[in-house]
Amino acid sequence: MPLPLRSLVERYSYNVVWEEYDKEFVARAIEWPSLAAHGETMEIALTEIRNVIGSCISDMVVNCESIPEPITERKYN
């Protein structure tokens, strides 16, 4: 993953939990509610969701779509 893309992907807010039904860890990002990734370990699940988000961002750039802003960088009134 190119450095500028990796830098953006790392600024999102992630959550990794154990899913008993799947018997795997599931990672999600608050800013990307429709995406999830599974892994045998927390680290694998987190790496997978970051890869998925990186791919989504790449596609969105090609299609001139707006990319979700990291929640910690949003401005509120």
Image (cartoon, rainbow, N blue to C red):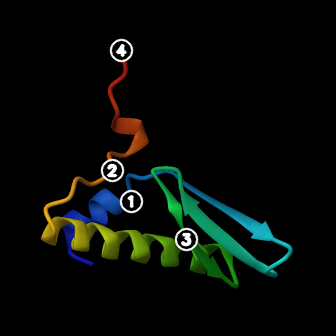
Judge the density around disc 1: few (<14), some (14-19), many (≥20) Cα neighbours within 10 Å. Answer: few
* The C terminus sits in image quarter: top left
Q: Position of residue 48 (x, y in %)?
A: 50, 78
Side of 21 where 57 appears, left or right: left
Q: Label 2 neighbourhood size at 10 Å, few (<14), some (14-19), many (20+)?
A: few
Residue, disc 3: 46
Q: Is residue 19 left or right of residue 61?
A: right
Kind of residue indicated by mark 1 = Glu
Dot 2 corresponds to which residue? 68
Kindly identify the amino acid type of the residue bearing the numbered disc 2. Pro
Image coords of residue 59 (percent x, y): 24, 73
Mark nearest the camera among 1 and 4 is 4
Q: Quadrant of residue 44?
A: bottom right
Instruction: State the SS at label 4.
Output: loop
Three-letter code for the amino acid on which mark 4 is drawn: Asn
Q: Which quadrant of the figure contains the N terminus?
A: bottom left
Image position of 3 (left or right of 22)? left
The residue located at (86%, 73%) in the rendering is: 20
Q: Which mark is residue 10?
A: 1
Label 4 CA crowd tier, 10 Å (few <14, some 14–19, many 20+): few
Q: Report the Cα–Cα distance between label 2 and label 3.
A: 18 Å
Residue at the limit of the structure toward the top, as seen here:
77
Query: Reading the chain from its start, which is encountered first: label 1 or label 4?
Result: 1
Label 3 amino acid? Leu
Can you tell which mark lies on residue 77? Answer: 4
